[in-house]
Each structure stands twice: as structure tokens, then as C-alpha cells.
Amino acid sequence: MVTKVTNESGATVSTIEVGRGLVADFVLPGNPRRTKVAVLTQPGAQQVALAYVDRLQELGLETHSMVLPDREEAKTWEVVAKAHGWLAEIRLTRSDTVLGVGGGSLTDVAGFVAATWLRGVEVAHIPTTLLGAVDAAVGGKTGINLAGKNLVGAFCHPTSVTIDLDVLDAVPLNIQREGWAEVYKTALIADPDLLELLHDSGPLTPLDDVVERVVRFKAEVVSEDFREFGRRAVLNFGHTIGHAVEFASGCSHGEAVAVGIVAAVAISRDRYGFDTNVREGLAVFALPTTTNADAARVSELLLLDKKNDADGVRMVLLQGVGDPIVDHVTDDEIELALRSVGL
Ligand SMILES: NC(=O)c1ccc[n+]([C@@H]2O[C@H](COP(=O)([O-])OP(=O)(O)OC[C@H]3O[C@@H](n4cnc5c(N)ncnc54)[C@H](O)[C@@H]3O)[C@@H](O)[C@H]2O)c1
Ligand SMILES: [Zn+2]
């Protein structure tokens, strides 16, 4: 399956392919001036990256690779500066391409490195985690962390995203479950049938039934609201409190999103009577529904959240499955939400 992300003028900015055994026929989008590819990868994705390096060399491209630190350790200024220094050494020009091969933290930083090198060069992504495939690699948000998650970044759409289900099937369960949190998020905000499927089959749900529909939904929402002035914000469901918990506790992004979903559902239940047993649903994927993060630190980070505006904290809430609404929440509601996840 091939799907596209289009910009405000309807032009295609990203082509996303989902399939199996994709490395054998992998090509980058046509660009007769490209001679080099800089592959950025991370420890867990090195085998996959090697296969793509072989393929690029087969295509006659000069290929260089760099392994960045793992997980959030990669999303720092120091790593960006190191990658820029390396691009200077290998003399990556404006006609060349950065290829990000890895999970969401790798594609977030690879995209940011590409966006800022020579004022922007082409980036393409090979997501190697479920989370990266269904969410991070699609949509053009790139960034690094400062005093909060993703505070510095740029929009930079990958010209191509290649999602190989064979690669994702081989990911260990403890990493796979982090991706299920984002799949579960999408089911809650957009897809009652998918939610039913997840509740029935849990982590045994075949990726063939999941990845394509989640990616198609994200591509559609991003195409409609390229720079998040409106509808795109619904994709942040579970992320307001989730990001604060992630930063305060050092847990993984997927685990934090699971906790954030429980918190957002607590407010949704109180306000709109929304009632779905998300705790049970998430527990089937071995995802946490409470946190032992420092409560004061979480509250402090919520204030910092970049999505806050003059009127306070805005959150995505659910009036029903597939019926999200973005609204300001009161301090009392935040307290209720934090209490619901053990804070
Ligand atoms: N840009 C966006 O729109 C967006 C959306 C969602 C999440 N994100 C970001 O994505 C990040 C989380 O992504 P993630 O969960 O993929 O994390 P990650 O990139 O840190 O990867 C998780 C772990 O999986 C390992 N790994 C990667 N591929 C593997 C493979 N094929 N087999 C075995 N291990 C493998 C990595 O080495 C790492 O240890 C967060 O930083 C989050 O902020 C961004
Ligand atoms: Zn996320």
C-alpha cells in the first residue's frame, strides 16, 4: 500500500509505503543530482541500516553511516552538532539525502539534522519500531528535548517513508508494546473497529491489520492540517500529561502515552461520561496505567508544555470513541487526572 501526505496546496510531500521485503527494491525518490546518502541510525536498528546501505551501494550511491546514541539520549544539541560535523566531513551537499533508519527518537533527530543542515536537505525515513512506523516517521515533526520534550524542532517532511512489516514483526515484544500505545491512541480518537480488534486480539493483532490503517489516518489528518492549526492536535491525545510523565520519570515514550491516555480518559469520563475500560485495554499490551513519577515535577512540566496558551492547559478529550475534542482543562481536572494515574 502506498499513501501520501500532501501540503496546503495539495502537492505531495511524502510518499509512505507499507509492505514486506521492501529493502530488495528500495529506491529513493528521483533526484538526478544526488550522489551521496548519509545514513543516521541507532543501536537497535543497525542490522536494518546495513541492509539499506548495501542496497544504496548497489544503486551506485556513495553511502556513509553514523550510529547515534540510543533513545532520548539522541535528542540533544550535542548529538545534532556531532551529526552536523560529520555531514561537513563527508561533504553532504544540498542535492544529497539524509536517511534515518530507526525508531522515533532516531527519525526525530535525523529529521532535525536534515532540516538544519545547509538550511534543509532531503530526508527519507525507514522506521524500525512500531511506534516510529505508525507515528513518529510520518508527519514531518522533528525535534530535540531541552527543559521539556521536543521544545526545539522544525517541520521537515521525509520525501519517502518505507515501512517494512517484516522488520516490525522482528522487534522484541518489550519494544513493540510501546508502539501499541500509539496504535491504541489512534483507535480511541478515530477508529472504533480498530479498538474492538485490539480488545479482542491484544498484542497478537497482526500488524498487517493495523499499520496501514493507522498510517493512512495520520497521513490524512496531517495533509488536512499540515502545521497543526486545527484538527492535527487530536493526534496529541494522551500526550499532554504523557510528555510530562515521560520527562519526569524517564520512562519510554510509549509507556508515558499509555499513562497519559488513562489521565485524559479520567477527565473525559468526568466531563462527558465517556466510559471505556482503557486500563484493561492497555494492560493487555503490558502497558502501564499508573506512574511513580515525581508529582511536583509533572505539574511543573505541565506548566511548561508548549501547547499551553494564555488560557491554561489545553488537552484532547474524548466525548466518545472516535469523537475527540480539544479544550482547556481546569486545575481541578488536572488534579483528578493526575490522581487517576497514581500521582
Ligand atoms: N515526530 C513525531 O510526530 C513523533 C510522534 C510520536 C513519537 N515521537 C518520538 O518518538 C520517540 C519514541 O520512538 P520509539 O519508541 O520508536 O523509540 P526509539 O527510537 O528510542 O527506539 C526504542 C528502542 O528500540 C530500539 N530499536 C529500534 N529498532 C529496532 C529493531 N528493529 N529491533 C530491535 N530494537 C530496535 C532502539 O535502539 C531503542 O532502544 C520519542 O522521542 C517521541 O517523542 C515523535
Ligand atoms: Zn507519541
Image (spheres, rainbow, N blue to C red):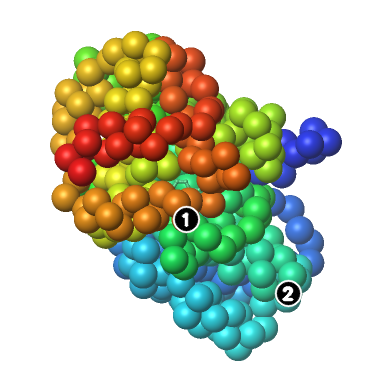
**Which residue sits at x=52%, y=68%?**
39
- Distance from disc 2 to disc 1, alpha carbons, whole Å, reads 31 Å
Residue wearing tag 1: 304
Quadrant showing the N terminus = top right
Q: Nearer the viewer, residue 299 or 83?
A: 299
Image x and y of residue 19, in percent: 46, 35
Q: Can you identify the residue that label 2 sits on?
A: 118
In the rendered image, the quadrant that contains the C terminus is top left
Q: Is 21 drawn above or below residue 143 in the view shown? A: above
Q: Is residue 103 left or right of residue 262?
A: right
208 relative position to 64: left or right: left
- Helix, strand or loop status at disc 1: helix
Question: For the residue marked with disc 1, what is the amino acid?
Answer: Leu
Picture coordinates of residue 201, whole percent (x, y): 22, 20
| Residue 342 left/right relative to 143 | left
Does 38 sit above or below residue 304?
below
Closer-to-camera residue (287/107):
287
Q: Is residue 252 left or right of residue 83?
A: left
The image quarter containing residue 247 is bottom left
